[in-house]
Image (tube, rainbow, N blue to C red):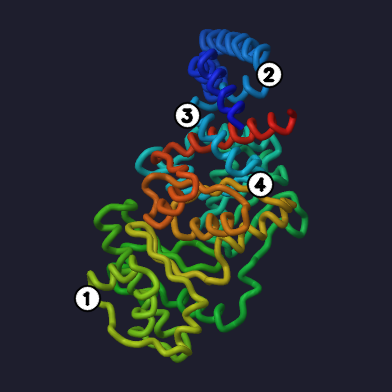
Amino acid sequence: MTDRYDELYAVYETVDAETIRAYQDLVDLYPPLDSSVALSYWEDASETLAEKRADVADRYGEGVADLVARASRDQAFTALDLYTSYGRGVNVLVLDVDETLRSAGHTDNEIPREVLHLLTEFHEAGVPIVICTGQTLENVKGFLIQGLGNELVHSGDLSVVYETGTGVFTPGHGPETKRLLYEDLDDDVTEVFAEVRARVLSDAPGDIRSGCHLQGNEFNVTLKPNHETGTERAVDVVAHALRWLLSLLGDAVSDANEREVKAYYAAQDPEIAAVLDAADDRPDVSVPDAVAARLERIDVAYYEGDAAEIASRELNKVVGVTAALDVLGVDDPFALVMGDSKSDRRVMEWAAANDAGIAAAPAHASAGVRDFVEARDDLVFDSGRAGDVLRTTYALNRLAARADEN
């Protein structure tokens, strides 16, 4: 194994990888424009890139030429560390979207062109993509088709786990194209969601009716702020929306009451406890076992300044991801799991427990997610820089393929 590190060190010492990577990015990310000058510049860059890559390929092989064109020295050595630890490459990507692939504070809430291009590179290399998000299916389909193209989205190698695992959409798989996982839940759960949905805005306090909207989910009940995410007004109204959802659950869950519901979820989640404490609305009551047993099936999520939501604990991103992998035919997954929230951490924990992948998170991820990722492989990336981890993973796959060839 030391030989691999020595060889990689020699490559980056003798090759101008930074210049090659700059030319590769120029050719990949800035295609010819409707201008003879721009076209000529792009063609010159393409020729120079081909010459430089050919020189590296003559000395070290095509795989190494591809590696230095995509990954920095640090990314390549991180990839080699990962290969040393796990002995294999990634064969599926499991990716959260909001505040992971894109970041409202750093990428204008758009997925960067670099990230989109890297995803197409993985697709062309035969690596399936699972988009795993709390968003609605229609929202996800829209930006994926716009960013990745209709052909890739409908290739049969891309799946969308939407609404945090309530459904899975995998175009090109006939009757398996859309799996409505929430249809398998029993009436004890579905009736609670129906009652909460019916009242969540019509009976809401005035500031919630004017300051929130109900996300167009198929099953989950999600209140989103009408103010810009993360602003003081959004933080205030989402906190009130959380308390309102807990009150509605107190009415909808059989034999429960509002005080018991708030006490239960405060004990389960310190962020929920903090919201209730700030409003002096955290009851000091015991929760009967029968009530706790019912509430165990219902998840309440709070994302400061972004959303308050109820979902089924029996339907989560892990359930959705395993269903997506089944449809895609990935029998022995080793995934790159990228995410920022506790719902993403569950997928990361599933991958770790089953020796089924590696985990990465943005620096602004929730504390529990970041702690988990740092303890595993320390794949923490700067906000808006998801491409850095994708490049590292691309390098990992190149190193794994080269090892297999040898």
Establish if 26 lies above or below 110.
above
Closer-to-camera residue (306/380): 380
Quick check: 5 left or right of 98? right
Q: Which residue is mark 4?
A: 158
Q: Residue at label 1?
A: 280
* Above or below, comparing residue 40 to residue 205 in the picture: above
Task: Give the number of the mark in front: 3 or 4.
Answer: 3
The percent position of residue 56, horizontal first and vertical second, equals 62, 14
Corner quadrant of residue 382: top left
From mark 4 to mark 2, how far is it between C-alphas? Answer: 31 Å
> Could you tell me residue 131's position as x and y percent?
58, 49
Q: Earlier in the sequence, mark 1 or mark 3?
A: 3
Q: Quadrant of the C terminus?
A: top right
Q: Earlier in the sequence, mark 1 or mark 4?
A: 4
Of callouts 2 and 3, which one flags the residue occurring earlier in the amino acid sequence? 2
For the residues bearing labels 1 and 2, Cβ distance under 8 angstroms: no
What whole-number distance in Å separates the C-alpha atoms at marks 3 and 4?
29 Å
Give the residue at x 45% y 40%.
Answer: 110
Provide the residue designation for mark 3.
74
Query: Could you say whether the residue bearing mark 1 is in a helix, strand or loop?
Result: loop
When the figure is inspected, residue 120 is found, relative to residue 137, above or below; the finding is: above
Taking the spot 65% from the left edge, 73% from the top edge, the residue there is 184
Residue under label 2: 61
Density class for disc 2 (Cα within 10 Å; few <14, some 14-19, many ≥20) is some
Residue 202, horizontal then vertical, whole percent: 39, 75
